[in-house]
Image (cartoon, rainbow, N blue to C red):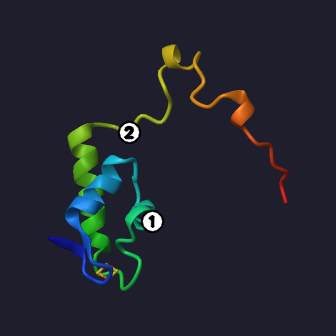
Amino acid sequence: MYVCVCLAVSDHEVQSAIEGGATTREAVTRICGAGGDCGACHGMIATMIEDHVEESGPIVCCPPASATSERLVPETALVRTRAA
Ligand code: FES
């Protein structure tokens, strides 16, 4: 079933974006394109995000203390930038 008719994005693609970490409609749009045109599907996308949050529990924003000792990205891979 299409969630976003304008851009022919299916419910599976939107669900995949949400399960991949998209927690806002804007994030879903960036990932799969859904919601990037007329906006008629924004409500459906928001509902899918809300359903996912209800099913999976609260969003954890920080890793548990036990996981912070291991870096996810090596220090050498980080690039420092200057503020504009
Ligand atoms: S139906 Fe999704 S942007 Fe129009």
Quarter of the displayed picture in which ligand 1 can be seen: bottom left
Q: Residue furthest front?
A: 76
Quadrant for the C terminus in the image: bottom right
Horizontal arrangement in the rendering, residue 68 relative to residue 16 (left or right)? right
**How much space separates mark 2 and mark 1, taking CA atoms?**
17 Å
Horizontal arrangement in the rendering, residue 81 relative to residue 26 (left or right)? right
Quadrant for the N terminus in the image: bottom left
Task: Answer above or below: position of 61 versus 40.
Answer: above
Task: Answer above or below: position of 53 versus 33.
Answer: above
Q: Which mark is residue 59?
A: 2
- Dot 2 or dot 1: first in sequence order is 1
Task: Answer above or below: position of 22 versus 63.
Answer: below
Mark 2 or 1: in front is 1
Horizontal arrangement in the rendering, residue 21 relative to residue 72 (left or right)? left
Give the number of callouts: 2
Please, what is the three-letter code of the amino acid marked with disc 1? Glu
Q: Residue at x 38, y 39 (%)?
A: 59
Q: Residue at x 74, y 31 (%)?
A: 76
Q: Residue at x 66, y 28 (%)?
A: 74
Quadrant of residue 9 within the rendered picture:
bottom left
Q: Residue 29 placed where, x, y %? A: 41, 67
Q: Residues within 10 Å of mark 2 (few under 14, many from 20)?
A: few
Q: Which mark is residue 55?
A: none
Q: Disc 2 vs disc 1: Cβ atoms closer than 8 Å?
A: no
Determine whether the residue tagged by mark 2 lies in a helix, strand or loop: loop
Q: Residues within 10 Å of mark 1 (few under 14, many from 20)?
A: some
* Residue underneath mark 1: 26
Q: Residue at x 30, y 63 (%)?
A: 46
Determine whether the residue tagged by mark 1 lies in a helix, strand or loop: helix
Please, what is the three-letter code of the amino acid marked with disc 2? Ile
Quadrant of residue 60 within the rendered picture:
top left
Q: Nearer the viewer, residue 1 or 25?
A: 1
